[in-house]
Image: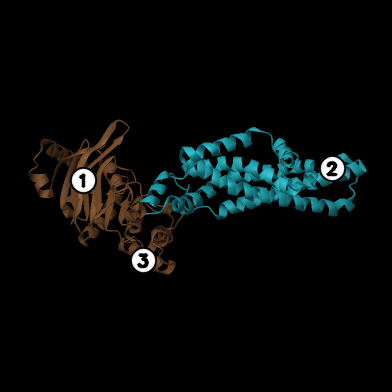
Chain colours: A brown, B cyan
Amino acid sequence: MSLLKIVDLHKKYGNLEVLKGVSFTLEQGETKVVIGPSGTGKSTLLRCINRLSPPGAGEVWLDGVEVTDSKANINELRAEMGFVFQSFNLFSHLTALRNVRIGPIKVKGMNKDAATKLAMEELERVGLTDKVNAYPAQLSGGQQQRVSIARALAMSPKLILFDEPTSALDPELIGEVLTVMINLAKEGMTMLVVTHEMGFARAVADEIIFMENGVIVEQGTPSQMFSNPQHKRTGEFLHKINELYGESD
Amino acid sequence: MAFDWAWLPLLAHGLILTIEITVTCIAFGFVLGVILALMRVYGGKWLSIPASIYIQIFRGTPLLVQLLMVYYGLPSWGISLSAFVSGVLALGLNTAAYQAEYLRGAIQAVKSGQLLAARSMGMTMPQAARYVVLPQAFRIVIPSWSNELILMLKYSSIVFSVTLLDLMGVGKRIASHNFRYFEVYVVVALFYLALVFIITQLLRLLEKKVHIPGLGEHAES
């Protein structure tokens, strides 16, 4: 059984159909990268998976439980899916440590001492032991994004959804975030990542999913997609990304 | 022109009543204001419309009329409230409408992505409001809230019209004994001025104390 199964997912904003039937699966421990032109529905796809934005039709299954079932306990299911945002969205009034431990305490009912210990471990994992008492506004973008990854990890999620985690960052800060993500993938975390960082995709992606106009045009392993794309659009898009972002590996 | 300081103990009583009324009505108005603001921002149509109507009514009619309706009007419906309760209730219901509007602005000023982040980790809407949005909104609202507090302190003087001996009521009584209206009201006014000064300083301290480190110190977000 797949850890995440998406079946024929549809989403409309008014008359605009953003997702026109998207289906794929994600196995335990896999990392898949979603690429595609902007406005193609990649972020919408991620938000439909944890129902931050309710899908119009189709099914999402997490570990055998239907997320899209209206009777499902959505808060419990969301707690099992980490979400990392493009704009970090750390809680401004809380220190890095408190940002990371608030989920375990309030959502999972963990006691404060255990949650603090856990939060320290997760912050160590993203290399921020010296910043535990800093507030978000005192951190660089790269540091903020690493705190937000630690915040997701502290919930011990079954998978993490990344929504363009490096596209709001200055170029010199992208590397530190990608390094953390690459390590996570290598440690066996299940990840679905919307990104244009092809260096990351080459390094750890089991598969690349190319989306355009609300549908999946093509999916395949990185080497397959780079060397022998089946669709003309896939080749054109990958070529364009390479020109824009360069080879980062 | 000398002021007869023998009245001082009476004035002190009035001062204490003024502080009691102001603090109670502000606290009551704050609780109701938070509820109204949450109804307006997150309540959907069915909760936000009643909240809007409430706010429109209490901001759109004179406070004195509201007070007189509570104290002299409600007894005809069989509800008789003491002068103190009437004063606090009328002032509290009124300030709730204003505080709700300030709070609504503050809630909307908290970056919406933080609410998404809270929901995405499995917090319920009440949890997200309580642990993420409101702690920040309360900080943002302090400057406009301190204005409201100062206004309510001064507006509380209208309770003399329902027989209460607050600072204003005591002043009026003293003046009608000694006919030294000018001196008496100057002293009363100085008491209000001193209170406003103290409140302003205290709230400035509070604002500094709860300021989020690093926020607003550099341009990038």
Q: CA distance from mark 1 to mark 3?
A: 35 Å
Q: Residues within 10 Å of mark 2 (few under 14, many from 20)?
A: some
Element type where label 2 sits in the image: helix
Mark 1 sits on what residue? A7
Mark 2 sits on what residue? B172
Which amino acid type is marked by label 3? Leu
Counting residues from the start of the chain, the first of labels 1 and 3 encountered is: 1
The picture quadrant where one finds residue A80 is bottom left
Chain under label 3?
A
Q: Please indicate whether residue B130 sits to the left or right of residue A55 in the image.
A: right
Is residue A248 at least partly visible in the picture? no
Which amino acid type is marked by label 1? Val
Q: Which mark is residue A213?
A: none
Q: Residues within 10 Å of mark 1 (few under 14, many from 20)?
A: some
At x 47%, y 37%, the residue is B45
Q: Nearer the viewer, residue A165 or B171?
A: B171
Mark 3 sits on what residue? A118
Chain under label 2?
B
Q: Residue A158 at x, y = what percent?
A: 27, 58
Q: CA distance from mark 1 to mark 2?
A: 77 Å
- Number of numbered discs: 3
Which amino acid type is marked by label 2? Lys
Q: Nearer the viewer, residue A8 or B219?
A: A8
